[in-house]
Amino acid sequence: MQSFILSRRRLLAKFSGTAAVLSVAPQALARVVAKGGSAVRLSDGVLTIEFDSGLHSRISRGGTVLTAMEPGEAIRLGDEQVIDRFLLLDQTQENVSGVHGTGRVHHLRGTSAGRIEKRVSVTFLDRYPGLALLDVRYRNTSAATVVVTGWQAATHDLLAHTDGAWSFSGASYPDRRDWVQRVSPGFGQHNFMGMNASDYGGGTPVAVVWRRDAGLAVGHIDTVPRLVSLPVSGQPSGTRIAISGDQPTLLAPGASLDLPPVFLMVHEGDHFRPLDAYRRLMAERGLAAPAIPDASYAPVWCAWGYGRDFTTAEVLTAMGKAKEIGLEWAVLDDGWQTSEGDWKLNSKKFPRGNGDMRAFASAMKAGGMRPRLWLAPLAVDPGTDLLRDHPDMLLLDTTGAAQNVSFWNAYTMCPAYPPVVDYFRGQVRRILGEWGFEGLKLDGQHLNGVAPCHNPAHNHARPEESYEKLQDFWKALYDEAMAINPDAVIEICPCGDSFAFHNMPGMNHTPASDPTSSWQIRLKGKTFKALMGPSAPYAGDHVELSDRHNDFATHYGVGAIVSTKFTWPHDPVNTTDPLPPGGIALTPEREVLWRKWIALYRANMLPKGEYLGGLYDIGFDKPESHAIRAGGAMHYAFYADTWAGTVTLRGLPPGRHRLINSFTGQPLGTVSGPVASLPARFEHFLVLAATPLNQKAAA
């Protein structure tokens, strides 16, 4: 082990034995940029972190300085003082080997006037150049108890660039905002990973900001979700990124506060590379998506076009048309039940109860389709038998109030309460085992995260158990389903939320989850291909929710599973959602288009290919571009309202390639790899396939 110790004379010359303590407003932590040089320089050859004598830090990528020297870490005390400067005392370093492979860790120790000691461990991993793991600990070295009311870590301003910056935020909001946004003056999101509304919360604990030439990513890699924030904001000097917490903590003399394990990454391109690295780190820590059955990639028809007032006859009729045009899944959506919570069969639709539901699932299979059933776990309506008989199942706040689920005017049940887990395991057994469905659509914005639970009947060790054990609830349901049918498809659809990564082991299929635009379908697709892997079974959700209500090109080009909720032979009479202009019935004209895209999807099965998210920047590259390697060919998709100019084909293997317009079949000549340019004119989209000349042309 090597060590580095600052001399006492140098320390006294720098700080005269005192630490900088700043007073700020309760909602903010101080950030004062230091002008001094570095005392310690740590690097893996890609990422460089320099620390000055006050443990402020500066970040560089290669030879490019990305931030100023600034206080990366700070804590706020109960008297509203913020401590962000710690006198560097010593540094040690050693080789390490563990679940993330080999690397080197650097330990730095500093003090704030003998009151608080700070330790920072910076680990560079050989597998992950450009990424560092940060472990931060504060210890009370005074003789009195210290109240800590907040902390921040990995706080840096990515210096401004003339072309501006873009951001990815993994938090969930009730306005269902874009996960990827341009950073404009005044832009700011707190990105709290807990509840940002009664039924919107949770997410992926990562934030990314990037310029055209480089970016910064921050996140935590704990295997349970944490109630932290990952704020992103536009500043005069650039774009600020951080991870922070505001849960009060009492530190007795000698006691320590350990922050969640943090990763900091420098990168090129958009958010794909950092999220892909995060996925691999978490897999090494034991948290990963399960094996994906082939059925998860089958194209989908959903009966939600009929709303809750469907009849079984019209569902089976339209399902026949869905089968005819090449779809394989038939999803029976909301409306089969009497209520959320009791999950009893609606007698108007299934008068013979279980027998009718078994017959309905059998009719779907007899018609050549795979049956999937909708369910909204953890929601219970007022007035239900379940709530009357088991009020102990509710998640309660500190006042004894329930957490609302707005869409159904329901309440949330506690996922960490064993009777709740057992109740929904029983629902899975009934649906898959007794009724014969082959998949589940688990739906609702409340699925992504829950508030801390204060229900005294649950005997939680801590209220946060409800939030932290939501992932165990989903895994329990998934395991129950796999025990019944190992090929079952389990879809979690947290309507409009930024998907909670920790829930991923409980699902083998994910949709765009009520997108508000084609842009959202594409950016979510790119995000899921990073978080679940380059062959993730991501569905574009109902194409009727896309631009112009028919944008299959967006589904196809990002490697999404095609999905639709059309009705047939006519529009529904009553629906929960208003019909778009022109309705949603599959007219003869639409059928031609639907058949063409579904056939193209089935011919190339791009979701099973390798989505190459690092080739293009979804923010800066124009037109918006995506690439997938599948079936021995390279498939490209370009998007813009209108485009007249050059498109760039990156990632081609060396040699000559034959180009074809995948949608029209038109030959487009030949190009040479690894990078080629092509003049193009299009409206909305252009999808291409590039096949080596010694292979048969791809569709």
Image: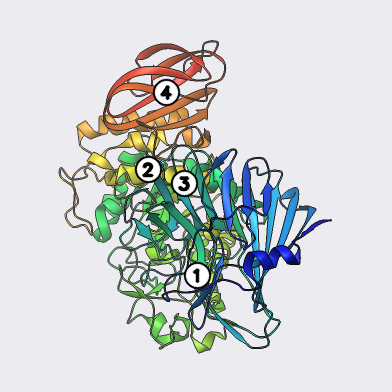
The reply to whether discs 3 and 2 touch (Cβ–Cβ < 8 Å) is no
Q: In which quarter of the image is residue 186?
A: bottom left
Question: Is label 1 or label 4 in front?
Answer: 4
Label 3 and label 1: CA atoms lie apart by 29 Å
Q: Is mark 1 on a helix, strand or loop?
A: helix
Q: Mark 2 points at which residue?
A: 164
Name the residue beneath numbered marker 3: 527
Locate residue 300 relative to residue 419 in the image: left or right: left
Of callouts 3 and 1, the N-terminal one: 1
Looking at the picture, which amino acid does disc 2 mark? Gly
Question: Which residue was labeled with disc 4?
Answer: 648
Left or right: 138 in relation to 381? right
Q: Mark 4: few, some, or many residues within 10 Å (few <14, many ≥20)?
A: some
Disc 3 residue type (three-letter): Thr
Q: Mark 1 points at which residue?
A: 424
Q: Please determine whether, in this image, residue 409 is positioned above or below residue 42.
A: below
Q: Is residue 391 at least partly visible in the picture? A: yes
Q: Is mark 2 on a helix, strand or loop?
A: loop
